[in-house]
Image: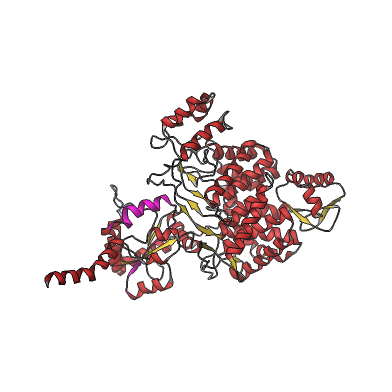
Amino acid sequence: MKRRYVTFLLAILLPGVLFAKENTNSLANESSPYLLQHQHNPVHWYPWSSEILQKAAREHKAVFLSIGYSTCHWCHVMAKESFTNEKVARLLNKYFISIKVDREELPQVDAYFQNIYYNFKGKRGGWPLNIFMTPNKEVFYISGYIPLKTPHRDLGFMQLVEKMHRLYDDKAALHKALLEIKSNHKNEIDKSNKEISLQTLKNSLLESYNEEYKGFGTSHQFPLAKRTALLFDVAYFTDDEKLKNFYFETLDIMALGGLYDHVDGGFFRYCVDREWEIPHFEKMLYNQAELSELYTKAYLQSGKQLYKDVVEETISMVKKHFRTEEGLFYSASDAQSDKGDEGGYYTFTKEEVQSILSALSKGSVIEDALGFRTSGNINERVHIGFDTSNRPESYKLFQKSLQDIRKKKNFPFIDKKINTAWNAMMIKALFQASVIDQKYKIEAQHSLDALINTMYKNSQLYHQTVLPNPPQQKALLEDYSFLIAALIAGYEQDYQIKKLLFAQYLFLEAKRLFYKQGSWYLSRQHAVEADYSDKHYTSPASQMLQNALELAALTNSRKYLTVIDDSWIQKQKILKTFQSSVPTLAQIYIEFKKGIVVLKSSRQNLLNNFEAITKISYPYLLKKDVKNKEYLACTQRLCFAKEKEFKAIVDKIEEYK
């Protein structure tokens, strides 16, 4: 009887015991790869929703919010240290409602709290971003990565959780903490009489450029594609050779140093040092897109083979590791190898490198170019990079041998989200890379069709999905911004009017959904205003303004310019304050001032002169198919040249500067 009773109890309790061991929480029902990474944490995580915030209010609990993404290194570290820790979980579960947010899924939520972080700390935040707040989103503590234990005066995470619980229960202390964060709001817009001009932009670039280490970083080095592009544009219009040299120096260090994967191609997210030597080894789709576009233009401007190789290798890497069977693109790959070590897949042992070098007839040349790296430049392992202004002789043979070693390893985790904005950025880069090889135009068209078929349903654009799930989340401003830009880039390759018409339709839809009284908002709720800072990639608001300028030029209609005219004074104040630190907005200012030039002729004329058109140096040139056998060069204001011969119209465009 007793044995049957024990068996009966086990039958009832065992499923619960197994469930507790598995620690499945509410994130198990989500599709985000980042949220699913935390579905078995002992922390009772919830996804972001108004219902969960209401739950916290009903239970009189504060909210702990943690924001990150699936390939974020320090998110992994904090998860391993704290979110899988049973003791930490018990405290969080007892005193807080804990919410996880994938910043790629909900960039508007991330932007809201990143703004609070910036206003309070006076510097940009990263990930993970950790917030303690009231159920109505009043923040009383905000921080980046927090270690579980610390030898310094700062609290470790477990002690911090206990302190935040006590603070929330102490109304006077809570009021003080809330007031401290709110009162630190910084009114950034400069009220002085600063000016904005090509000269002030030039001065800003000269002042902020790091001549010793190249680029614009002082401690970390991010591949600031738009700011680097601005170097060339300002140099072109001011005839400044120094700025032009800075431009090519930056391109060289990014392509030859540690930021670039010299074995399989593609760029890492950023370097942790100012020397461009040691990267965080994540690869983000948006970096591959914006940097491919940058190096395509640089190749046309210089003819340097290195830049062409970088474009081709980067696209090849994306196709190999990020492209789906349908022609869509995944979001990112992790820094950690399957053994859990950061960069393990990408680095080599000293013995592996020396063995390859000794087998090559010109191995000594490559060894000299590698410099100190052969002794181990990261955790006693070798991360490939070169000190030369070009790749060394016999590099391809060296590269092939390194690729053979990599084939024996497993590629890092891939976040398989299909993000509309980032896919559109990659599609635009492919369209533009068709000046290097026409096959990219075919691939871009295939991917564009796949993106529209997957993410545009019943006249509704969507933000993202994980295949084969149908998309559920409606599109954000960034999705419209970058898809419009991709359609315009595609139109300039094949002159199919349907692309231009669809871009116009999406622009008007975006204006209806996200634009209000001179401001763009990140989502339909108009809760978070879009700023003009090109942080991790181009600002969606700035991209939308650029779209407006290009649509106005291509259609010869001023109706698109109202989004610029409506708040141009405010935008100029932003420019006067931040100058080259808001590079896309600065480019828009130059385009507005100097004019976008549209080369108009018949489709056949434009296609026949495809290669020659790519050599025109004027930075802001568009092409349009018109029923005209002659060639016209026009700005928004007037057509300033009409010629029968192609060479003559090119001369007029070059003189327009």
| Residue located 66% across and 41% down the image | 299
Colour scheme of the rendered structure = secondary structure
**Residue 150 drawn at (x, y percent):** 29, 49
Magenta region includes residue 14? no
Determine the residue located farthest toward the bottom in the rendered image.
58
Residue at the image position 68 percent from the left and 64 percent from the top = 502
The image shows residue 427 at horizontal and vertical percentages of 62, 54
State which quadrant residue 161 falls in: bottom left
Q: Residue at x 50, y 33 (%)?
A: 401
The magenta region covers 59-85
State the image coordinates of residue 3 (x, y, percent, origin top left): 13, 69
Q: Name above or below for residue 266 compared with residue 195.
A: above
Q: Is residue 11 above or below residue 416?
A: below
Frontmost residue, 104 versus 318? 318
In the image, residue 63 lies in the stretch drawn in magenta? yes
Asked if residue 13 lies left or right of residue 72, the reply is left
In the picture, residue 17 is in which quadrant?
bottom left
Say if residue 292 shows up in the picture: yes
* Closer to the camera in the image, 444 or 243: 444
The reply to whether residue 191 is visible in this rendering is no
